[in-house]
Amino acid sequence: MNALNVLFTLGSSIVSFVFAGLVLDQWWQRRRSFQLVWAIGLLWYAISTGAEFVGSAFGWSDPLYRAWYLTGAFLVPAYLGVGTLYLLSKTRFGYFVAASVVLGGLFSVAATAKYPGSSVGGYTALALSLVTGAAIATATAVRRELQAHVAMICLVTGTFVVAALVATAHLSGGYLDPATHVPVASAFPGYLRVSSVPFNAGGGLALVFGALYSAYIYMPKRRVLAARLAVVAITVNFIASLPGAARALLQGKLNSRVPATLLIAVGAFIPGVTSSLDRFGITWALLLGQFLGVLLIFGGFLVSEEVFNNIRVGFTLWARGDVKPAEG
């Protein structure tokens, strides 16, 4: 037993379960779709890190290992990403999500070089990613309010498919890195390893860049490029607006959602990096990255004024007005 592994995974699981409960309570109060989907994603996070805790503390089993891989590799980033799309469903963020899913499919094909015999899985993942991306992009163009619903239908369908594949896959090899005792996915066949990439890439990129875009919405803006330049304008204007946002923060005038969403972006980025390193055999940072990631995302949740719009004390609900985005 590695004491740090037990500590990090226990902490991640506890924070995730508490976090999921708070977000679910917000959904119960306000019935906003993004809150429900995020709560589901956080529940997957809690189950995945909880499996790591049980495995680290008491030993691994086949069912525990399969639950860990299904929730951690496939479901956590995907559900958090779709939750972000629901949050931004009044924008054209669906185009970015569609591109991210397709990019994940391309990465799946590229990953087949690392996993012999996985070509069919890689090209199947690419084909399904193209279909999913096209569906989300079409919904964004034709009826923007449907973009998140379309993504959710694709995700729920994919959840059942990959759950069946993970449950029936033949396991071969060890579950842990012998040096760090951190779980690795090497016991799963290559076709499952490459199939997880669109879930990770599409969801992870949506969460990180959705949080950054939300920060841009609520920060005081300096418009260097015209909005008609779309992604290029948002990127340049976001960078140009950072000094003004820093000044507003020091003056106590910055909308609290800006630092909150930046914390969420960093919190999503860190486990994305450490899980990618784990895929290439660099395992020592995985559990630490998961713990830091959920702490930062939870911190962003607590910093946001949105959290305190409705506060439940026992059965009493205290409410105050909504926060408006920055003008300009």
Image (cartoon, grey):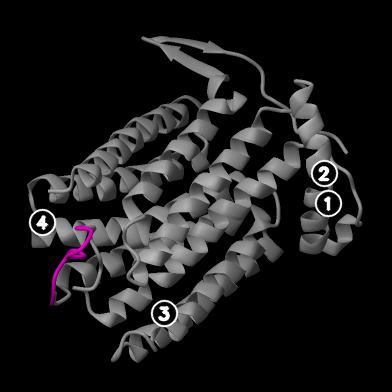
Up/down of 316 relative to 101, above or below? above
- Residue ID at (29%, 42%): 8
Nearest the viewer among 143 and 259 is 259
Mark 1 and mark 2: span between their CA atoms?
A: 6 Å
Amino acid under disc 1: Asn
Pick whichever of labels 4 and 2 is earlier in the sequence.
4
Q: Which mark is residue 237?
A: 1
Residue position marked by numbered label 3 in the rendering: 125
The number of discs equals 4
Quick check: marks 2 and 3 in contact, CB under 8 Å? no
Mark 4 and mark 2: span between their CA atoms?
A: 49 Å
Pick whichever of labels 2 and 3 is earlier in the sequence.
3
**Which is in the foreground here, disc 3 or disc 1?**
1
Nearest the viewer among 100 and 256 is 256
Up/down of 258 relative to 141, above or below? above
Where residue 162 sits, quadrant-wise, is bottom left
Callout 3 secondary element: helix
Amino acid under disc 2: Ser
Mark 1 and mark 4: span between their CA atoms?
A: 49 Å
Q: Which mark is residue 143?
A: none
Give the image location of residue 72, x and y in percent. 32, 56
Crowd band around label 1 with a 10 angstrom C-alpha radius: few (<14), some (14–19), many (20+): some
**Which is in the foreground here, disc 4 or disc 3?**
4
Residue position marked by numbered label 2 in the rendering: 241
- Residue ID at (12%, 48%): 1
Pick whichever of labels 4 and 3 is earlier in the sequence.
4
Mark 2 and mark 3: span between their CA atoms?
A: 38 Å
Quick check: marks 1 and 2 in contact, CB under 8 Å? yes
Find the magenta span and give its range.
Answer: 172-181
Mark 3 and mark 1: span between their CA atoms?
A: 35 Å
Residue position marked by numbered label 4 in the rendering: 60
